Image (cartoon, grey):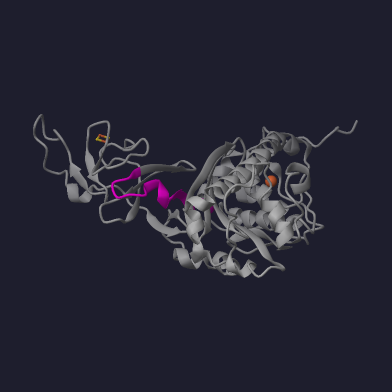
Amino acid sequence: MDAPFQTVDRSAPVPPVADRLKPYLADLDRPVGEAVGLPSWIYFDPAVFEAERKTIFSKVWIGIAYESDVAEPGDVATADYAGWRFIVTRAEDGEVRVFYNLCRHRGMAVLDGPRHQQRTLSCPWHMWSYDLKGRLIGTPNIGGTGVHTTPGIERGELGLVPVRTGRWMGVIFVNIDGKAPPLAEYLKPTTDRLRAFDLSLARESDERFETHFAGNWKLAIEGGVEDYHIPFVHKQLGPSGDFTGEGCDTYVGIACRRSMDIAAVRYAATDAPKEGAPLPLFPHFAGGGSAEASVILSTLPATLVAAVTDHVVVSIFIPESPERTRVRRRFRFVGDAATDAAHAAARRRMRDAWAVVTDQDGPIIERMQLQAPLRDEVGTRPRFSPYWEPAVHHFQKVIAARLTEAA
Ligand code: FES
Ligand SMILES: [Fe+2]
């Protein structure tokens, strides 16, 4: 009798992730309408997560935190990402610095959360202390009670280990292996694609929110770069307009041209009373008619900028484990509308509208995560709508290329 479904032989030795993926590349590389997507074990296998750490996360610029996490000199914060633990500081000189959260004595995590008005960081185990520039400045009792120095322990050599750091749109990026091109160069395809929007006008507001998904980070990105599900999952949002999905080596994304009428429905869709002044538009959209109303780009691996008629949402998706992702969002608005009292109600409505959408996506992603082992056992793989899902297809190609390229 034929087997009712294709089973996976879990007793066989498991080859490296790159070797396991290679047989799927030819199907994936076909035109989007004919392509067959990647196997579902990429969403739950710890070996894939480890491979992503080595071949993706450590090699590119990862968005780990916001500058506003350390808004004032003396602010410090922790930032965790896929098993790495970082400390972010803003010292008296105003500079943002990132270090591994790793004491140079015996390796304790120095910091356990955000603090303000700090001059030093003290390790909780034996109280070695560091200034906010990472320099080791105190080794109490190292030579015996009351003796704070000892031969061989050179403070000048034992500062916190710094991480290469860059900033854009309020996001603090790090490059772990130190070999990525400069941040501006890495982001250039993204910033070029966003050129219609004058992002110099987009100022950060206090509007923000954070959540978690019990799902793999790639599911979150794939859900964010297609509009196919919008009328079914986000029924409150209006039509998509002229939709395109696109991508390159460093970003995937979607864009829509819309008339002002359609854009107003899509992005102001809450039942909240329309109190306060309406948000000002980006200049390229202020003339009316149809224009590029939204460009939503996820820069590899998972920093997502959504530039829309009158706001920008800057989101970082933080892979915490193969099956858990933290989502942080910060909202920017045009000029003074980011901070003035007249637009406070409109800012809040926009934040709330995005929170509703995010909360609608969460259960879908979590249910997809639960499906992944079943998809693996049965042996089904994704198919793509050529109209709606070229960016999802492209994302899978980029991930597969990174995971299979020579280590
Ligand atoms: S491990 Fe930090 S002071 Fe000992
Ligand atoms: Fe969605």
Picture quadrant where residue 390 is located: bottom right
Q: Is residue 275 among what the camera can see?
A: yes
Q: Say left or right for 351 vs 363.
A: left
The x and y percentages for residue 336 are 48, 59
The x and y percentages for residue 337 are 51, 56
Q: Say left or right for 288 vs 1.
A: left
Q: In the image, is residue 118 above or below residue 298? A: above
Task: Assess whether residue 73 is covered by the magenta stretch.
Answer: yes
Closest to the observer, 111 or 3:
111
Q: Residue at x 71, y 56 (%)?
A: 393
The mark total stands at 0
Q: Which residues are magenta?
A: 56-76
Q: Residue at x 22, y 38 (%)?
A: 128
Task: Assess whether residue 27 is covered by the magenta stretch.
Answer: no
Picture quadrant where residue 112 is located: top left
Q: Residue at x 18, y 45 (%)?
A: 137
Residue at the extreme right:
1
The x and y percentages for residue 374 are 74, 34
Q: Is residue 365 among what the camera can see?
A: no
The quarter of the image holding the N terminus is top right
Q: In the image, is residue 255 above or below residue 207? A: below
Closest to the observer, 267 or 383:
267
The x and y percentages for residue 103 are 29, 40
